Image: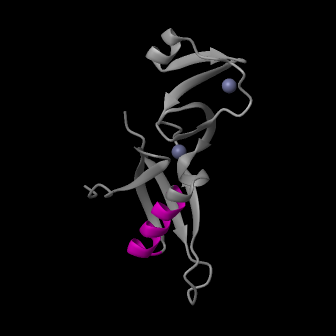
Amino acid sequence: MSSTHQVVITQPDPESDDFEFAVTCPSINCSLWMRCKDCSHEPTEQETAASEYFAHDVDHSLIDGEWMTDTEQCAANATESGADGLSDLAHQFGPSTQQFDVDYWGDGVWDIIHVPSEVEK
Ligand SMILES: [Zn+2]
Ligand SMILES: [Zn+2]
């Protein structure tokens, strides 16, 4: 499944290196999962084996050894690694519209993968 995002990169002040990003998010494969803070649920062996359980109306998944829940925030917007990836795009291409995929690399790090725009026919 494609998780292609679009970002409009603008540079309000050409003298500075500050870029602004307007990300269009398809909400696919990019949702940020965070360790559940309000969990008193003790996962059973079966749940641990399946790497998931359902408690207090939320799905939990075992990711990197932590029980995580979906924050429904886009990792490109909500993480430091996402911000770094966008910043790299800005420095590479300058003010422009770019497409990228978001991929979970592991260890809390997200990859922003540039998708070259298709050649116009
Ligand atoms: Zn929980
Ligand atoms: Zn997203």
89 or 32, nearer to the observer: 32
Above or below, 10 relative to 76:
below
Q: Is residue 1 left or right of residue 5?
A: left
50 or 9, nearer to the observer: 50
Residue 33: percent from left, percent from top: 57, 37
Residue 114 covered by magenta stretch: no
Residue 82: percent from left, percent from top: 51, 56
Question: Image quadrant of residue 21?
Answer: bottom right
Residue found at x 51% / y 27%: 62
Residue 44: percent from left, percent from top: 56, 11
Q: Quadrant of the C terminus?
A: bottom left
Q: Quadrant of the N terminus?
A: top left
Tell me which secondary structure the magenta stretch mostly adopts.
helix
Question: Image quadrant of residue 91?
Answer: bottom left
Q: Is residue 80 left or right of residue 121?
A: right
- The total number of labels drawn is 0
22 or 41, nearer to the observer: 41
Q: Is residue 44 left or right of residue 112?
A: right
Question: Image quadrant of residue 80?
Answer: bottom right
Above or below, 87 relative to 112:
below
Residue 37: percent from left, percent from top: 71, 34
Residue placed farthest to the bottom in the image? 15
Residue 93 covered by magenta stretch: yes
Q: Please report the bounds of the magenta region as a residue range.
A: 82-94
Render colour scheme:
one colour
Above or below, 91 relative to 3:
below
Residue found at x 47% / y 51%: 109
Above or below, 53 relative to 30:
above
